[in-house]
Image (spheres, grey):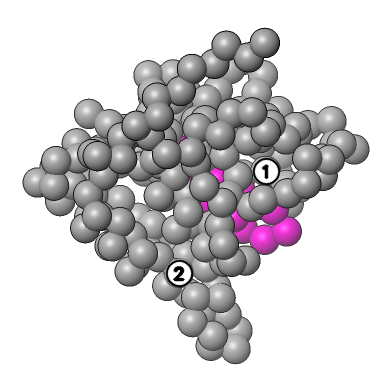
Amino acid sequence: MNNIKYEYTKTPLDYQITEYDCGTTTLLNALRYLFKRSEISPEIYKYIMQYTLDQTNSFGEIGKGGTSVNAMEFLCEWLNINANSMGMNIKCTSIQKDNISIYNSDLQNKINEGAVAIVRVFQDCEHYCLLTRIDEDYAFLFDPYYLNINYYDDDNDVDIIKDRPFEFNRKVKKERMEDNTVKDFALVKNEHSEIIIIEKI
């Protein structure tokens, strides 16, 4: 019997609706995770929708390059400056590129205190997910890309979780995230590396 109790003044975490809006969806999921519906400013929602999906693809098609690191950093700084005046006490902190690691002590401490983190990982391409929990061996993520429950059956490092809609839908070995590869959920460690911790303060 599942004894998990959710606070239904919040909204379940959501999935992207195109091939490109993982950044948009993950930033909104950070707000869904941290705040009640009644606490989320529609103006902040509007700004997120306005400034994500800022990249074009190689054909110049708008939005088909997804959301850039610069756009995500701009929005998080905008939240630091403006969210408080809208009744949302938010603090966003970027981890420096040289310190990008799932074993980063500041990251682990903040997650254990109830914060979340936007992480840039590989999944065929560079992709955004929301980190919501860490234990000794695993990272627990909400991946906004919807997949069949059996998708990772042959992958010993990743499990799909379907019964935690307010928290996470992937359980990933921390060693996998630290792999210097392009396997699914390995952290991006190049000029596009990104981890942004978001706290409700």
Task: Check the picture and name the quadrant holding the C terminus.
Answer: top left
Q: Position of residue 53 (x, y in %)?
A: 45, 69
Label 1 – label 2 distance at C-alpha? 21 Å
Give the overall secondary structure of the magenta segment.
strand
User: Where is mark 2, residue-wise?
Assistant: 53
Left or right for 88, reference 146 = left
Quick check: is 125 in the magenta stretch?
Answer: yes
Q: Residues within 10 Å of mark 2 (few under 14, many from 20)?
A: many
Span shown in magenta: 117-129
Q: Where is residue 30 in the image (x, y as percent from the top left)?
A: 40, 41
For mark 1, give the secondary structure: loop
Earlier in the chain: of badge 1 and badge 2, it is: 2
Task: Check the picture and name the quadrant holding the N terminus.
Answer: top right
In the image, what residue occupies the spot 60% across and 44% down? 143
Q: Where is residue 196 in the image (x, y as percent from the top left)?
A: 40, 43
User: Where is mark 1, residue-wise?
Assistant: 185
